[in-house]
Image (cartoon, rainbow, N blue to C red):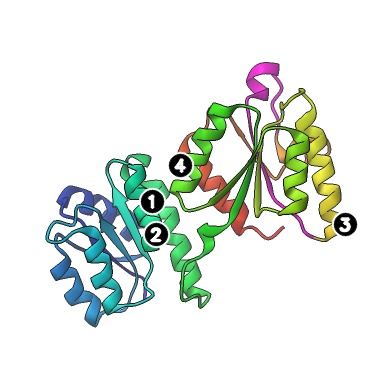
């Protein structure tokens, strides 16, 4: 059953999500209050619930408890218009599957719903795909902070490295599920050397870590890179130029994590 249950007092937003999900062939039922939604949850087989923090009739944490009393392991996506550190921390403590900020755009929400659905099809009782670890290697602290916020809000675990050598040590000591790499680190070629060394070590381990290059090298040098045309000397699995949009980044991250290399 591909039914998504959506609890949000904002009728216009529910209509927007309804249109998006039905376009993707999901079944959808939206409600303005928790009480209405629980009646459906008791009699219908739903694969996930989208719950807004401003659910209206009760606090969202109480709503989450009541949802789990009906369906103990159902994945819950918590939505909010404005992010707050306290809210995000509490959401993670309460074990919500995804913490989603509406201003990031509906595309990110759709990616989350699809991942939950795929996990359900594979027989997973709980959604764990977004708990995967991503290592970000970039010498720009501001970029690191921005990417960390985007990825953590989407439910990923994030490790950081600011140099080629620091990145290598973290790959060796605690291999991530994905690497996001800037090409121009402490030198303009450090990222290239890192790529070759990671691929070499991956062959020795028989474990291939996908690499997404997010870099401004094209803007600064005028050269354009692509894994399809430049794979021999640019052996990343995917490439995005800076600045990168959050939904575009998350789409490429999801694609690489779900791709069998």
Pointer 3: residues within 10 angstroms few (<14), some, or many (20+)? Answer: few
Near mark 2 (Cα within 10 A), the count class, few <14, some 14-19 or many ≥20, is: few
SS class of the residue under badge 1?
helix
Residue furthest to the left = 57
Q: Which residue is mark 3?
A: 204
Q: Are marks 2 and 1 in contact (CB under 8 Å)?
A: yes
How far apart are the alpha carbons under marks 4 and 3?
A: 34 Å
Q: Nearer the viewer, mark 4 or mark 2?
A: 2
Looking at the rendered image, the disc whose residue lies closer to the viewer, 3 or 2, is 2
Nearest-to-viewer mark from 4 and 1: 1
Mark 1 or mark 3: whose residue is earlier in sequence: 1
Q: CA distance from mark 4 to mark 1?
A: 22 Å
| Image spot of residue 83 (x, y percent) | 33, 42
Magenta residue check for 73:
no
Q: Nearer the viewer, residue 216 or 150?
A: 150
Q: What x and y, as percent, mark residue 243?
A: 53, 27
Drawn side of residue 197 relative to residue 40, left or right: right
Q: Which residues are magenta?
A: 207-225
- Indicate the secondary structure of the residue bearing disc 3: helix
Which residue in the protein does label 2 denote? 93
| Secondary element at image label 2 | helix
Q: Looking at the image, which residue is at 36% across and 72% down? A: 74
């Amino acid at each position: 059953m591909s039914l998504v249950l959506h609890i949000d007092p904002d009728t216009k937003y529910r209509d927007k999500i309804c249109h998006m999900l039905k376009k993707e062939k999901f079944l959808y039922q939206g409600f303005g209050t928790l009480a209405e939604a629980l009646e459906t949850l008791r009699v219908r087989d739903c694969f996930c619930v989208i719950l807004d923090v401003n659910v209206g009739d009760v606090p969202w944490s109480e709503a989450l408890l009541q949802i789990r009393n009906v369906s103990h392991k159902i994945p819950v996506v918590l939505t909010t218009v404005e992010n707050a550190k306290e809210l995000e921390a509490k959401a993670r403590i309460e074990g919500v599957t995804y913490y989603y900020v509406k201003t990031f755009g509906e595309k990110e929400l759709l990616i989350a719903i699809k991942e939950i659905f795929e996990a359900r099809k594979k027989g997973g009782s709980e959604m764990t795909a977004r708990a995967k670890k991503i290592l970000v290697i970039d010498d720009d602290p501001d970029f690191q902070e921005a990417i960390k916020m985007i990825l953590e809000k989407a439910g990923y675990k994030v490790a950081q490295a600011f140099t080629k050598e620091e990145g290598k040590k973290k790959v060796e000591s605690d291999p991530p599920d994905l690497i996001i790499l800037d090409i121009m680190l402490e030198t303009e070629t450090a990222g290239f050397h890192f790529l070759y060394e990671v691929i070499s070590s991956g062959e020795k381990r028989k474990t291939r870590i996908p690499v997404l290059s997010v870099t401004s090298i094209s803007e600064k040098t005028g050269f354009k890179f692509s894994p399809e045309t430049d794979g021999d000397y640019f052996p990343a699995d995917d490439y995005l130029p800076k600045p990168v949009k959050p939904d575009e980044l998350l789409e490429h991250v999801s694609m690489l994590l779900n791709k069998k290399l």
